Amino acid sequence: MWYSLVMLFLCLFQTQLAKAWVQQQTDDFYSVIPQQLEESARGDSHPHRAQRSSSGHAMMSRAVSGGGLTIDTLPENMTRVVEDSGKYYTWRSFGPEDRRAQELWVDMNDVRHGQVRVHGILSNSYKQAVRVALSFDFPFYGHYLRQIIIATGGFIFTGDITHRMLTTTQYIAPLMANFDPSYSKESTVQYLDNGEVFVVQWERVRLPGKESEGAFTFQAALYKTGTITFSYRDIPLSLDAISSVEHPLKVGLSDAFMVTSPSSESPDARRQTIYEYHRAEIDITKITSYSAVEFAPLPTCLQHDSCELCLSSNQTSGCSWCHVLQRCSDGMDRHRQEWLDYACSEESKDATCEDYTRGDSSTGSSITPEIEDVTFLTPLQKGCESDDDTKHHIFKTGNDVKTDSSTKSDGLANTGVIAGIAAALVLLLALILVALYINYHPTVASPLYLIQRRKNYWPSWKFHKQQPGYTEVEEGHDKNSIVEAGPC
């Protein structure tokens, strides 16, 4: 009895701990609003602002979670996370006294910049994110993006796979923090896209628990050239005073790649792991009102579309050419999985462009026919007693490759066609000879036999002495010049 009560108490205690842990973990999670909800809420002006639920979360969208996706750092035997400014981007910070900081600010009220859209869902929710399509290809770490995800927490998610841990990596964060746009009617999340620049502005958003400190207004601009700018208009308190317990506090850029590997739980299951390969972090002490940060993209290996440019360009370093994929890379980008699947690191090891050229020429475009013995490693069928039947000669002429078995089959097919034509000609000649024989010997036994056994409708033949041919005429229409043989 006492044992049962103790076990019941332990089970209830573990259940409460699990619920508390889940609640703590989900506090850091973002939910991406489904496209259907975003389309149905395109009316940006709402008669009232939606209130946050008691748990602080609205409807959750489907996301990759559980045992299917993990986010981890690179192992020690791989390249560590790079945090320098000379790999993918260079950046500069501008203070309030710098004129460049004022130039980088995009005035959303200026109609010359394009039409501004105040997003109704993001402006009325907490820890939500919405996918938005771009009108141009935006280069990010050498990859061209055509859509991004805007989050209420002051950042943009750029990953291809949607999950709930958006704050971990693959972000553009002018000021990632625990902002709650649903607190005030004045808080909005708005953006514009004029084909040359895409601007997202978080206007008068506040932090839970620090609402009285003031509202934050800042923006991120993504230019078609790949340049990224962070501009700050209102920063009411020092960023050092913002807690990162409930929400990460970040300013900068980050990108990662995904690798698929077998799961330890089941041999048939696959596990997807996201590895962050680069991060650019900005000193948060430099973020003040009327300050700005400008990121300039650097050339990457992915921009080279030929082996010569890939291996000889002085703008990039550490690049390798994967001839199978026709791609230039250093192995650390979002195509990492393909790079591993096709063993590009081994293929490009100590290889030159001349090696690939010689390899291509040896497999094609030879004018002189070559003959060589090749043994096909195909499984032998039942009844086969020797390997000799599987050996063939290969004839190479230009880019065409044919085995002698196919050549023999083609020869047999041609012989059959010729034999059929010859048989048809012989049969036609025999019929002509029989017709001539009947024409000139109508009283012989064989012609009379055919005439006697003709049907009621048996066409008669009309002969003309001046013409060697004949025409068919039905009986009873024209009796003139018709030679008929009467019954015997």
Image: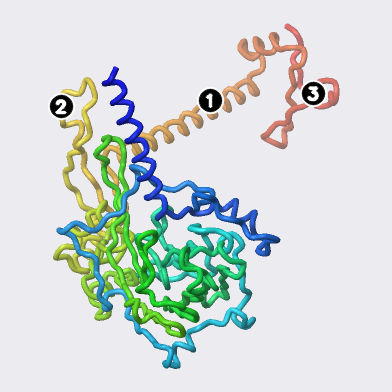
Residues 206 and 415: in front is: 206
Q: Secondary structure at mark 3?
A: loop
Q: CA distance from mark 1 to mark 2?
A: 48 Å
Q: Amino acid at mark 2?
A: Ser
**In the image, is 263 to the left or to the right of 25?**
left
Quadrant occupied by the N terminus: top left
Residue at 45%, 87% in the rendered image = 101
Query: Is residue 147 among what the camera can see?
Result: no
Q: Are marks 3 and 2 in contact (CB under 8 Å)?
A: no
Q: CA distance from mark 3 to mark 1?
A: 25 Å
Q: Amino acid at mark 3?
A: Glu
Q: Residues within 10 Å of mark 1 (few under 14, many from 20)?
A: few
Mark 2 — residue? 386
Q: Secondary structure at mark 2?
A: loop
Mark 3 — residue? 474
User: Disc number at residue 430?
Assistant: 1
Where is 184 relative to 289, above or below? above
Percent of width and height locating residue 448: 66, 11
Q: Residues within 10 Å of mark 3 (few under 14, many from 20)?
A: few
Residue at 32%, 72% in the rendered image = 304
Percent of width and height locating residue 219: 49, 75
Q: CA distance from mark 3 to mark 2?
A: 68 Å
